[in-house]
Amino acid sequence: MTMSTINKALSSEAEISRRNFLKLGAGVLGGLALLELVGVGLMFLEPRSLEGEFGGVVNAGPVDSFPNGSITEFPAGRFFLIRAEDGGFLAIYRRCTHLGCSVSWKPEQNQFVCPCHGSHFDFYGDVENPPAPRALDTFAIHIEDGMVKVDTSRPQTREEFESSQFVYA
């Protein structure tokens, strides 16, 4: 075999056809797209626990800014903060225990109402009208330096309201 024959054989193997080049390019781009989709999917599934957002600790405000017998809604935190007549605090998750619809506070009726299936809950979140199977869930409350802080990372299930669920300043 001559040197020119060997050089021609090597150069023809080193050359890539247009079809193979396009296949390789499409494969690389497809792999990158798949990698991006997996990354976005993992970011979507990652829990959010940022300070002041749902899934974290929400600084509701000073104890004195909530009058006794009041209910204050925190839409970003997805809860209602109840201040009982005796000064106790209770944070109610606004998710109905029936199918998860968002309940709203109706002051003229003095109750929480679920718009989906008509469940009604009293001032403390106890079921007054089914189909909801139990009381509205609550969130843990901590009072630090005169500030009310609500931890929305874990809803606490309960069957009914008990006065021991109140947190006092």
Image: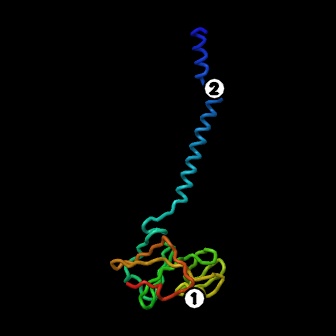
In the image, is residue 85 above or below residue 92?
Answer: below
Task: Give me the C-alpha separation between circle 2 and circle 1.
Answer: 77 Å
Q: Residues within 10 Å of mark 1 (few under 14, many from 20)?
A: few
Display colour scheme:
rainbow
Q: Nearer the viewer, mark 2 or mark 1?
A: 2
Q: Position of residue 15 (x, y in %)?
A: 59, 23
Instruction: Check the picture and name the quadrant holding the C terminus.
Output: bottom left
Q: Position of residue 154 (x, y in %)?
A: 50, 72
Give coordinates of residue 46: x percent, y percent.
52, 60
Q: Position of residue 74 (x, y in %)?
A: 48, 75
Q: Secondary structure at mark 1?
A: loop
Q: Residue at x 57, y 10 (%)?
A: 3
Amino acid type at circle 1 is Gln
Check the image and name the residue furthest to the top: 2
Q: Nearer the viewer, residue 126 or 1?
A: 1
> Which residue is more in the foreground, 162 or 16?
162
Which of 64/50 is in front?
50
Identify the residue under disc 1: 109
Which residue position is annotated with label 2? 17
